[in-house]
């Protein structure tokens, strides 16, 4: 029987550009008495990856477009932040009232291109999503393997969704394991084909991780132990991103 | 630090109408050496609730409408099943090719009103979603309390979603705890207001549960242990269902 443990990794210092995140996480897990083990899934909040990779934009350097300026004025927003949101996007999916839902360059559909607006006030600097979340996750996984543990890595972010209130954590980058588990062609114990065809286990792992990360202390890393995954070094989030041709809501 | 255990409850017999589900789950958990404990969250797949409540429709009794017949013929579907899907819905959100996305009477947006089409072939009978998932969950919780354990109950189903491939389990009924956790007004360790406003912990718990339920044996019940929740006997899924006026994708 599958039995999971889910726990946070605490005690990470403030992350700055160039930080060796995987080494830091590896050490922090050991320090709290939970050394990483082969088969663990390590879930890293995108925000600290952005910090480690220097994915920041100085507000002072941003020259907003006329469009960004006009819309921002109308909705009492900082036009420089709007400009960054637009630069981080491939296209605008919905722009209704003060809400801006975009498709990011990576192909994620979310509010404000995943730009972390909460970070703006303090430092005049805005955090953007990592440029290549799969690539970053692969690099983290490679570093963990180098440190002696064969773990899967998932980069997570907190997104809203249509139809339902409340955000949930989902996967935006992955390494080592496939994000989808397929039941196609399998049959249940009664011989019926499954109603469910494919489960996005990566998003479910991200959600499970949020339950231990998400609280006022905002632990940025969690581990899921006991999840059975097949090693695939070619894995990426690509199969989760629905083709816009096949999408009824874009 | 929050530390979760997630495990399935195995060994449940085939569920038939009138089954005392909570008592069965309580006994099965004990039998496998994992007796339920105060504070557990018990996640029950809607399918077995539908079975216990007799939420089935005999295909032989269904007279499909002209609309259902015409559309089903075109897409090689059973018009009686389409008729059931339509009867279970408040309105059709998208009908494109063979895909039918509806809003159920409860207010859930999903494919085919959550009607379990995989169950049709074998018995000439179709399973529909429970009529009142919050009410059923409350009844299950009351029964668990009667049996001596103060647990929260979440009813889950497997839904697709816009933009992303792969389904995930989400909550469709709840009892004992609120489905949303709000950060509004709280501040992070640096004094910034949270970017995230509200997390749908109920959906994240459902997702975590699927990781232990979802495999070829399809364990229909899981327990999350270690999640901190505040007791609220008025809790329901209502605050998760976004108002269609506020919804940009309906």
Image (cartoon, coloured by chain):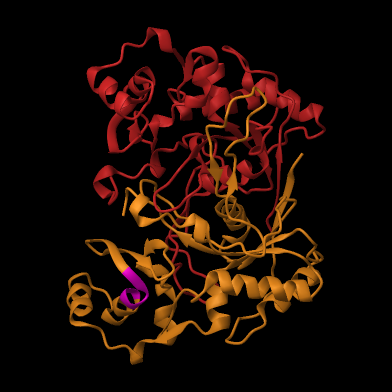
Chain colours: A orange, B red
Identified at 35% across, 35% down, the residue is B98
Residue drawn at (74%, 25%) of the image: B11
Task: Please name whichever residue, A13 or A236, is drawn nearer the observer in this view of the structure.
Answer: A236
Q: Would residue B73 be seen by someone viewing this image from the given angle? A: yes
Outermost residue on the top side: it is B61
Quarter of the image where one finds residue A149: bottom right
Q: Is residue B229 above or below residue A107?
A: above
Residue B40 visible in the picture = no
* Location of residue A120 with respect to B25 vertically, above or below: below
Please name whichever residue, B234 or B110, is drawn nearer the observer in this view of the structure.
B110
Q: Is residue B53 magenta?
A: no
Residue A242 image position (x, y, % from top left): 42, 54
Q: Is residue A202 above or below residue A111?
A: above
x and y percentages locating residue B217 in the rendered image:
69, 32
Locate residue B227, reporting x and y percent. 64, 48
* Quarter-of-image position of residue B73: top left
Residue drawn at x 54%, y 71% is A133
* Residue B84 located left or right of residue B49: left
In the foreground, B170 or B58: B58
Q: Which quadrant: the C terminus of chain A?
A: bottom left
Q: Which residues are magenta?
A: A85-90
- Percent x, y of residue B31: 81, 26
Quadrant in the picture for residue B104: top left
Looking at the figure, which quarter contains the N terminus of chain A? Answer: top right
């Amino acid at each position: 029987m599958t039995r999971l443990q889910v726990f946070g990794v605490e005690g990470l210092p403030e992350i700055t550009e160039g930080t060796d995140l995987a080494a830091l996480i590896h050490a922090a897990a050991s320090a709290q008495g939970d050394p990483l083990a082969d088969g663990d899934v390590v879930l890293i909040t995108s925000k600290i990856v952005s910090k480690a990779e220097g994915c920041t934009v100085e507000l002072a350097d941003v020259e907003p477009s006329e469009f960004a300026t006009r819309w921002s004025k109308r909705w009492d927003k900082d036009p420089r932040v709007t400009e960054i949101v637009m630069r981080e996007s491939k296209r605008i999916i919905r722009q209704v009232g003060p809400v801006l839902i975009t498709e990011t360059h990576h192909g994620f559909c979310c509010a404000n291109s995943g730009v972390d607006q909460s970070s703006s006030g303090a430092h005049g600097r805005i955090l953007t999503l990592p440029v290549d979340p799969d690539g970053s996750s692969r690099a983290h996984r490679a570093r963990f393997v180098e440190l002696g543990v064969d773990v899967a890595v998932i980069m997570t972010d907190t997104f809203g969704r249509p139809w339902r209130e409340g955000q949930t954590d989902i996967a935006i980058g992955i390494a080592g394991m496939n994000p989808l588990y397929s039941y196609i062609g399998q049959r249940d114990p009664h011989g019926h084909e499954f109603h469910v065809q494919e489960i996005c286990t990566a998003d479910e792992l991200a959600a499970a991780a949020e339950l231990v990360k998400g609280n006022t202390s905002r632990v940025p890393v969690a581990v899921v132990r006991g999840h059975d995954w097949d090693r695939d070094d070619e894995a990426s989030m690509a199969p989760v991103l629905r083709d816009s041709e096949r999408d009824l809501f874009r």
